[in-house]
């Protein structure tokens, strides 16, 4: 963790009820401190204050300037003997700010939250919901870690929850009600989801009523490959183009009906015409990898190549095209892969 020093003006929102302590195992000294939640505008943070003489000064409702706070995490700071604390004029705080829990008040299973609250919470949550979809089990990290995803629905929303290890190896049935403790929010491919931790527990519930699943619930997850059942399903993949096997640039027949047919000896093999288009076409055979496969082949033509290169590509000489492409490798994007290894619905990551 970085020891970066920062200065902040904060309004104190809440603080520990009493001084807390722990034994520093290195120095065998008892360390005393208290926590408070400070806020400015939309931002709330937890500060651990080792200056115990300030325990009665730092009161909720008052604002202070803190110089030389030590950064301990994204929204966590320490006030130490280096920190200078001074009174300051009232710091404005957004009225609908979500305040974090004081660390000593955090239940080990997390706070009881609706799925939507859990997705927005910076802290761990305990959630409940009806299972609307269960993914097949997958093994990552060279087959050592089991991963399973489920969609849970409650009155607030539908959320994807990722389970690991033993929890992933459990059987889950659609329609069952489930409680999962100690989950954190995480963003994956632009979608907010929840992820279980090593201390998470799952428990089936019998006495809960959650709304029934409707088709729309699955909409934002329909391209989520975690929920596809087999590789034969058309699935959205993250493709990485790694190598170029072959490249060709060629004249095409001018007639639209011949669909960019390659001219052979200045003649269209389909219509026999000799007129060619101004712009030539390009064919590139790539080797690519996805999360599950390596060294697959895909042949890509002009339009797909433009999508992949974000239009940033001119068809010039073969060597110029080749070096322009090689310079960009590896190229990464998201798309569907057909059974014949064609890419479509290409989107940038
Ligand atoms: Zn033709």
Image (cartoon, grey):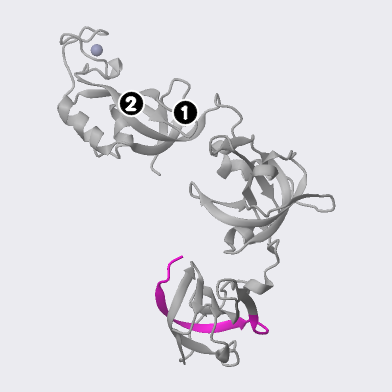
- Residue 335 at x, y percent in the picture: 43, 34
> Which image quadrant shows ligand 1?
top left
At label 2, counting other C-alpha atoms closer than 10 Å, the crowd grade (few under 14, some 14-19, many 20 or more) is: many
The quadrant of the picture occupied by the C terminus is top left
* Residue at x 42%, y 71% (from the top left corner): 3
- Residue 68 at x, y percent in the picture: 42, 81
Q: Is residue 260 above or below residue 61?
A: above
Rendering quarter of residue 228? top right
Query: Bounds of the magenta span?
Result: 1-20
Instruction: Please say whether residue 10 is one of the residues in the magenta stretch.
Output: yes
- Residue 224 at x, y percent in the picture: 55, 39
* Residue at x 64%, y 79% (from the top left corner): 21
Give the label, 2 or 1, closer to the camera.
1
Main SS category, magenta section: strand
At label 1, counting other C-alpha atoms closer than 10 Å, the crowd grade (few under 14, some 14-19, many 20 or more) is: few
Is residue 225 visible in the rendered image? The answer is yes
- Element at label 2: strand
* Residue at x 24%, y 15% (from the top left corner): 262
Residue 293's tag is 1
For marks 2 and 1, the one nearer the N-term is: 2
Instruction: Please say whether residue 3 is one of the residues in the magenta stretch.
Output: yes
Q: Is residue 86 above or below residue 272?
A: below
Q: Using the image as rendered, state which of residue 77 and residue 128 is in the foreground.
A: 77
- Element at label 1: loop
Q: Which residue is mark 2?
A: 286
Q: Is residue 58 above or below residue 305?
A: below
């Amino acid at each position: 963790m970085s020891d970066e020093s920062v200065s902040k003006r904060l309004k104190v929102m809440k603080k520990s009820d009493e001084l807390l302590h722990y034994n520093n195992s290195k120095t065998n000294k008892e360390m005393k401190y208290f926590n408070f939640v400070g806020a400015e505008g939309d931002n709330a943070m937890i500060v651990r204050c080792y200056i115990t003489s300030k325990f009665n000064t730092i009161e909720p409702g008052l604002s202070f300037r803190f110089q030389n706070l030590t950064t301990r995490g994204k929204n966590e700071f320490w006030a130490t003997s280096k920190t200078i604390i001074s009174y300051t004029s009232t710091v404005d705080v957004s009225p609908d700010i979500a305040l974090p829990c004081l660390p000593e008040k955090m239940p080990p299973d997390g706070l009881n939250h609706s799925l939507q609250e859990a997705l927005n919470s910076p802290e761990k949550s305990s959630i409940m919901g009806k299972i609307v979809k269960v993914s097949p089990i997958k093994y990552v990290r060279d087959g050592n870690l089991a991963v399973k995803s489920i969609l849970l629905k409650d009155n607030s929303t539908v959320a994807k929850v990722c389970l690991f290890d033993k929890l992933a190896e459990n059987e889950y049935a659609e329609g069952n009600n489930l409680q999962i403790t100690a989950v954190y929010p995480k963003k994956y491919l632009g979608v907010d989801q929840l992820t279980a931790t090593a201390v998470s527990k799952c428990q089936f519930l019998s006495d809960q009523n959650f709304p029934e699943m409707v088709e729309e619930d699955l909409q934002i997850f329909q391209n989520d490959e975690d929920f596809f059942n087999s590789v034969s399903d058309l699935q959205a993949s993250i493709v990485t183009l790694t190598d170029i096997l072959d490249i060709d640039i060629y004249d095409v027949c001018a007639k639209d009906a011949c669909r960019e047919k390659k001219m052979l000896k200045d003649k269209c093999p389909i219509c026999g015409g000799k007129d060619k288009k101004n712009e030539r076409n390009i064919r590139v055979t790539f080797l690519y990898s996805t999360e599950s496969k390596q060294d697959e082949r895909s042949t890509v033509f002009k339009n797909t190549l433009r999508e992949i290169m974000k239009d940033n590509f001119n068809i010039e000489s073969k060597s110029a095209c080749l070096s322009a492409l090689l310079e960009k490798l590896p190229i990464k994007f998201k798309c569907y892969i057909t059974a014949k290894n064609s890419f479509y619905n290409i989107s940038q990551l």
